[in-house]
Amino acid sequence: MKNTRQKEIILDAVNHLDNHPTADEIYLFLKKDHPRLSLATVYRNLNQFALEGKIRKVSVPGDSDRFDAVLDVHEHFYCEKCGLIHDVSIPGLEAQLLNHPTMKITDYKLMLFGECESCRAH
Amino acid sequence: MKNTRQKEIILDAVNHLDNHPTADEIYLFLKKDHPRLSLATVYRNLNQFALEGKIRKVSVPGDSDRFDAVLDVHEHFYCEKCGLIHDVSIPGLEAQLLNHPTMKITDYKLMLFGECESCRAH
DNA sequence: TCCTTTATGATAATAATTATCATTACTAAT
DNA sequence: ATTAGTAATGATAATTATTATCATAAAGGA
């Protein structure tokens, strides 16, 4: 594991772009200032960071994976009107899911769907 | 919406293959008796049935979509050891997720991860 | 500075799913 | 029954996201 400029700017970008960017969005964002950056490097490092627990990979059914630098427990809500992914807090959910009586559940991936507050107002 | 022999055998197959088959698994299963069946037809009808609510599409992060004929509320548990998807009941979960104070949540997709009972016994 | 090793960049490969379009076959009306 | 019209199918091309490959570049320790 060598430290590289690429790792640095990619991790910075995930923190900076706080709207759950895709690998490609991160790539395009960084390409402006770092034209020699490769999309493969972005994918490689995002996956590595996710494995190390530095970021979270957010699976969106039927769409590209997204990445999230916020590590606190929270859920993701996909607004079917505006297409944005919003953070949602559901207290007690994690404990409820992980403390199943028979199954040894160690992790989960959840995506909520509906219409966000902002879109509902219109 | 015309009734066809293909629609009939595809829906039957989802009911018969109760281990959350993929489109390709359904296709290969049916191909034995119906060699002229096309994979595109399988995909088309599975998606149509899912839209109509006759079956459920189960998204598996990083893997093919799967299909489920069981319509009763239940969750899916992916055993990281044996790779099988098990049905899990978590009473009260649906109500908890859909009754969010601020967001209008109408649906959700959840996948649980861990090690199943059978694998834990070994 | 040199050497070894790992990471990168560019691109090919893969895999799942959807799109296309000529042909087939339901269904309803004659 | 026959026909006409429409929707579905089969075969395959296209698409899209992601991973694999491999020659070159650059970390980091000696």
Image (cartoon, coloured by chain):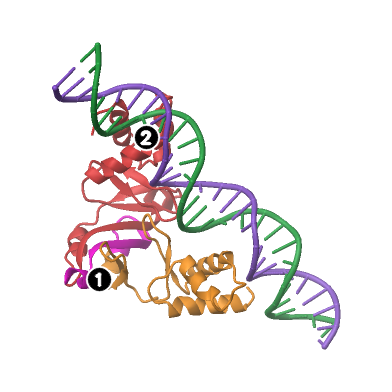
Chain colours: A red, B orange, C green, D purple
Up/down of A32 relative to B91, above or below: above
Q: Which mark is residue A66?
A: none
As rendered, which of D23 and D17 lies closer to the eye? D23
As rendered, which of A76 and B79 lies closer to the eye? B79
Q: Which residue is identified by label 2?
A: A41
Instruction: Tell me the residue at 40%/37% (across/down).
Output: A40
As rendered, which of B15 and B28 lies closer to the eye? B28
Image quadrant of residue A13?
top left
**What amino acid type should be assigned to the residue bearing mark 1?**
Ile
Crowd tier of the residue under label 2, counting other residues whose Cα lies within 10 Å: few below 14, some 14–19, many 20 or above: some
Up/down of B33 relative to A70, above or below: below
**What amino acid type should be assigned to the residue bearing mark 2?**
Thr
Q: Are marks 1 and 2 in contact (CB under 8 Å)?
A: no
Between the residue at mark 1 and the residue at mark 2, the CA separation in whole angstroms equals: 40 Å
Q: Position of residue B48 (x, y in %)?
A: 54, 68
Up/down of D12 relative to C13, above or below: below
Q: Which residue is identified by label 1?
A: B90
In the rendered image, residue B41 lying in the magenta stretch gets the answer: no
Q: Position of residue C23 (x, y in %)?
A: 75, 67
Q: Nearer the viewer, mark 1 or mark 2?
A: 2
In this rendering, the count of numbered labels is 2
Instruction: Tell me the residue at 46%/75% (across/down).
Output: B14
Instruction: Tell me the residue at 36%/56% (across/down).
Output: B61
- Chain letter for mark 1: B
In the rendered image, residue B110 lying in the magenta stretch gets the answer: yes
Q: Position of residue B5 (x, y in %)?
A: 61, 79
- Chain letter for mark 2: A
Asked if residue A110 shows in the view, the reply is yes
Which image quarter holds the N terminus of chain B? bottom right
Range drawn in magenta = B97-122
Image quadrant of residue A111?
bottom left
From the viewer's perspective, tell me whether residue B8 is left or right of residue A63: right
